[in-house]
């Protein structure tokens, strides 16, 4: 059995791991690597023949795990993609949105003399996304699925996102049974809407994410307390606005539920809330569809108070006209819009009109990769470029990790310990500092740990 690391190796994005059992090739995740400016060109250069892959296992929908699947299909992959049902639904939304982003990026450059767009060619189009969706085969949590005579798969719920799973493979390797688990992204306990991560069973090999290695979530304040504080400062003590960049899928639904609880309890006077993201509206419908998979807190709230994602003074913004109307809304308000790293979407419109507003607070609730506009603002940049214009930053910039969907250092160490005593632990999906911090902690616990380089091969 051979394991090769082709993505998220000593970096965060582009998750892609190749497991070979004899001649049978399984790709675990196929995400976009968007840490480099030339990501569209680089992502279509697979280090293997896509047609040689027999099967893809998708741990969850986020684009750094799913976003290059249509490219794989376009270049010859014709097998199945195994995932949970919510993952299939959410991935479809994200992939169609990726096409729109590619097309917009292509259209930004001036046309050629022949009238053609001169921007980067899209990685894939709607047809390729539809071809990819046709390959999805959904399986339930905690029920072994027989892939072939030698390999079975079990999905373990890990929180992080609706439908997110760790993939546990049981393999008959020349008469010897071996177990290998891929963590996907590990969530955290007591997170709004999502279930807490379930223990991953004992395995022989474990591929574990390390996003929050060496970092710890805030423990001395609850999410409710922090949101009340920020809303009070931004919208009640002064007649301002609170803008919260949030990923449309996952983060927005958890944030809306948390706000619903705050205003239901009457912890604050009413404040108008706008969710300005058509994709968030689609994703929220997926959460409603799979309501049996939300956590018990959300289920109990639904029984007593109704829909977690609907309440008074909450408005979902669909059209561009409605979005522009939000920009002209001058009473105190909360605007939730995507994308979370500020690299696209309607959030840029709201930034354009508010980044120089002294009465605006920008609250980051998620991770921002290096090089993104969000990262620059969090780093204290006094001037940023928005819509081809250099703009002074007068708005207040704040950040909280209380809505981070990733488990922290202690959560990751605990997850690894639950897997027993693997022969080797492979750390992926983390920046250098995080990888080293988690590796050191696991070494102290007696684990054999390695952070593979891209393309590194292991016989296991």
Image (cartoon, rainbow, N blue to C red):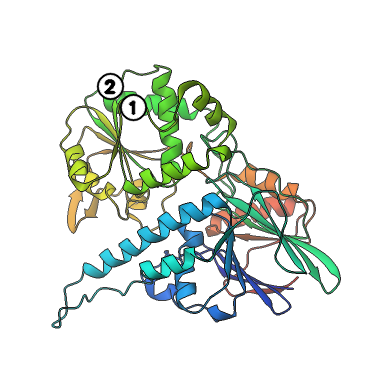
Q: Secondary structure at mark 1?
A: helix
Q: Residues within 10 Å of mark 1 (few under 14, many from 20)?
A: many
Closest to the observer: 360 or 30? 30
Q: Nearer the viewer, residue 268 or 383?
A: 268
N-terminal-most mark, 2 or 1: 1
What quarter of the picture does the N terminus occupy? bottom right
Q: Residue at x 80, y 68 (%)?
A: 172
Q: Which mark is residue 231?
A: 1
Q: Tell me the residue that label 2 is attached to.
A: 236
| Element carrying mark 2 | helix
User: Horizontally, is 59 left or right of 133 in the view?
Assistant: right
Mark 2 touches mark 1? (CB < 8 Å): yes
Which residue appears at 74% of the width and 48% of the height?
A: 417
Distance CA(mark 2)–CA(mark 1): 7 Å
Q: Position of residue 108 (x, y in %)?
A: 21, 67
Determine the residue located farthest toward the right in the rendered image: 175
Q: Residue at x 27, y 21 (%)?
A: 237
Q: Quadrant of the C terminus?
A: bottom right
Q: Is residue 119 above or below residue 177?
A: below
Image position, residue 119 (x, y; %)? 25, 73
């Amino acid at each position: 059995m051979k394991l090769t690391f082709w993505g998220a190796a000593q970096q965060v994005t582009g998750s892609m791991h190749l497991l070979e059992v004899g001649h049978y090739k399984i790709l675990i995740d196929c995400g976009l690597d968007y840490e480099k400016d030339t990501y569209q060109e680089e992502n279509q250069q697979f280090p293997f023949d896509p047609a040689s892959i027999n099967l893809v296992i998708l741990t969850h929908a986020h684009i750094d795990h799913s976003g290059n699947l249509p490219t794989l299909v376009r270049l010859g992959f014709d097998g199945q993609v195994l995932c949970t049902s919510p993952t299939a639904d959410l991935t479809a939304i994200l992939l169609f949105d990726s096409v729109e982003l590619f097309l917009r990026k292509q259209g930004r450059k001036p046309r050629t003399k022949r009238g053609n767009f001169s921007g980067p060619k899209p990685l894939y189009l709607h047809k390729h996304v539809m071809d990819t969706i046709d390959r999805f085969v959904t399986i339930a949590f905690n029920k072994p699925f027989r892939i072939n005579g030698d390999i079975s798969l079990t999905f373990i719920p890990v929180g992080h996102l609706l439908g997110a799973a760790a993939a546990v493979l049981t393999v008959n390797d020349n008469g010897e049974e071996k177990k290998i688990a891929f963590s996907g992204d590990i969530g955290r306990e007591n997170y709004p809407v999502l279930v807490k991560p379930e223990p991953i069973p004992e395995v022989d090999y474990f591929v574990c994410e390390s996003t929050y290695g060496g970092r710890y979530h805030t423990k001395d304040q609850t999410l409710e307390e922090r949101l009340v504080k920020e809303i009070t400062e931004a919208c009640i003590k002064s007649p301002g606005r609170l803008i919260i960049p949030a990923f449309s899928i996952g983060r927005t639904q958890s944030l809306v539920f948390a706000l619903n609880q705050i205003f239901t309890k009457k912890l604050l006077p009413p404040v108008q809330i706008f969710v300005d993201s058509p994709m968030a509206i689609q994703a929220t419908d997926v959460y409603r569809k799979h309501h049996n998979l939300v956590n018990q807190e959300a289920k109990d709230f639904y029984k007593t108070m109704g829909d977690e994602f609907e309440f008074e003074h909450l408005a979902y913004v669909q059209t561009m006209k409605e979005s522009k109307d939000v920009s002209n809304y001058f009473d105190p308000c909360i605007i939730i819009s995507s994308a979370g790293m500020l690299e696209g979407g309607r959030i840029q419109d709201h930034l354009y009109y508010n980044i120089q507003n002294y009465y605006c607070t920008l609250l980051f609730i998620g991770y921002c990769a290096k090089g993104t506009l969000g990262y620059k603002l969090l780093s204290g940049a006094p001037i940023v470029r928005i819509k081809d214009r250099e703009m002074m930053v007068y708005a207040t910039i704040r950040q909280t990790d209380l809505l981070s969907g990733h488990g922290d250092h202690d959560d990751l160490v605990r997850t690894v310990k639950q897997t027993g005593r693997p022969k080797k632990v492979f750390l992926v999906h983390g920046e250098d500092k995080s990888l080293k911090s988690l590796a050191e902690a696991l070494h102290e616990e007696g684990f054999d740990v390695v952070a593979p380089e891209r393309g590194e091969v292991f016989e296991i």
